[in-house]
Amino acid sequence: MEAIVKTNFKFPKQKDEYVGKVRDVYNINDEYLVMLVSDRISAFDVVLPKGIPYKGQILNQIAAKFLDATADIVPNWKIATPDPMVTIGHRCEPFKVEMVIRGYLAGSAWREYKAGNRTLCGLPLPEGMVENQKFPTPLVTPTTKAMEGHDENISKEEIIASGLVSKEDYEAIEKYTLALFQRGTEIAAKMGLILVDTKYEFGKKDGKIYLIDEIHTPDSSRYFYAEGYEERLAKGEKQRQLSKEFVREWLMENGFQGKAGQQVPEMTPEVVSNITDRYIELYEHITGTKFVKAENGNVLARIEKNVNDCLASLLK
């Protein structure tokens, strides 16, 4: 299958289109969003030159499953998934922060800790921790949503003092973040996985807070295999990960970290195929169901028809 890396649809009552690193988002009449998850892949805030077949379908279907599995905790934006690569839902005004939550000292938090930092987003970190160790309680470490470049860590106090989010709204989304992470942790445990860290985005529509975008996918979340976690931790070995960290590691091994002057290593068909296989593995482990590849004839025509059929019923 050819990867879908660019779309240019014109849907009924479409007002504008936003092209993100991975998602193409179409604004329908300022009421609804058509969110297409492309096969683009990003790492270190850079979109890599080749797409990964089926990645969009995998991420869209995982997110849809988890939005449904958490709808009792917080209302979410999803109305329908008319196509394997598309979710249609409410258009909300997003809060200008992303709610990152960490259960374990991993990834960028570990890199900061190893460099000697003992606070993260204003929160104190215990001394004597090792990489991938569990925090006593999960830490909410928000970031400001950068339109371009890297997202920046920010403390709860700074968010409220600067007026980025009101105190009342921040406390609500913080509470939702903790409850969603707890639910995600419980679902992961049933699959033999540990939800290490993740991020949530929230928005408002008609004064009501909604969970928006996607949740608990390998693009926004890091998972470890539970089996062997304690043994590897005790020996100081790398954990077996289910996340796109393997893409970042492949890039770093080949001298790329998104810094000026660095070249993305060649993405051979074999590299691309391996990444697809890893994403399918992620899907099957995270959902506990077999991945079924969507028909791969004229994918763009399929998407257009499915979205138009759904919008016809919404825009009556």
Image: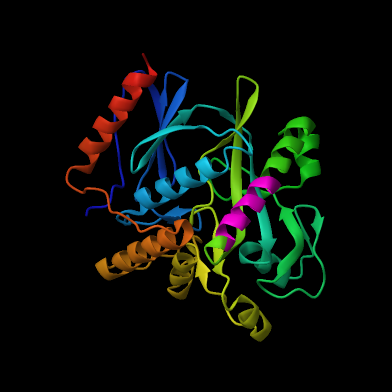
Please tell me in which quadrant of the rendered image residue 165 appears: top right
Q: Quadrant of residue 35?
A: top left
Front residue of 19/84: it is 84
Q: Residue at x 29, y 34 (%)?
A: 8
Please tell me which residue lies in front, 309 or 222.
309
* Rendered location of residue 145, percent (x, y): 60, 42
* Placement of 226 over or under 219, stated as above or below: below
| Residue 267 in sight here | no
Residue 254 placement, left or right of 143: left
Taking depth in this image into account, of 235 and 187 the one nearest to the observer is 187
Give x and y (percent) for residue 79.
45, 30
Question: In x, y percent, where is residue 257?
Answer: 50, 65
**Residue farthest toward the front in the current orientation of the protein:** 190
Q: Is residue 266 left or right of residue 1?
A: right
Quarter of the image with the N terminus is bottom left
Q: Looking at this view, name the residue that lies furthest to the left.
A: 297
As drawn, the residue found furthest toward the top would be 316
Quadrant into which the C terminus falls: top left
230 vs 120, left or right, is left
| Viewer-closest of 274 and 226 | 226
Q: Residue at position x 50%, y 26% from top? A: 91
User: In this picture, is 160 found above or below 136?
Assistant: above
Query: What stretch of residues is rendered in magenta?
Result: 178-189
Residue 291 is situated, as x and y percent measured from the top left of the image, at 34, 57
Left or right, residue 4 beside residue 193: left
Color style of the picture = rainbow
Q: Main secondary structure of the magenta part?
A: helix
Question: Was residue 123 drawn as part of the magenta stretch in this picture?
Answer: no
Task: Give the residue drawn at x 37%, y 16%.
Answer: 315
In reply to whether residue 187 is colored magenta, the answer given is yes
Q: Residue at x 39, y 61 (%)?
A: 279
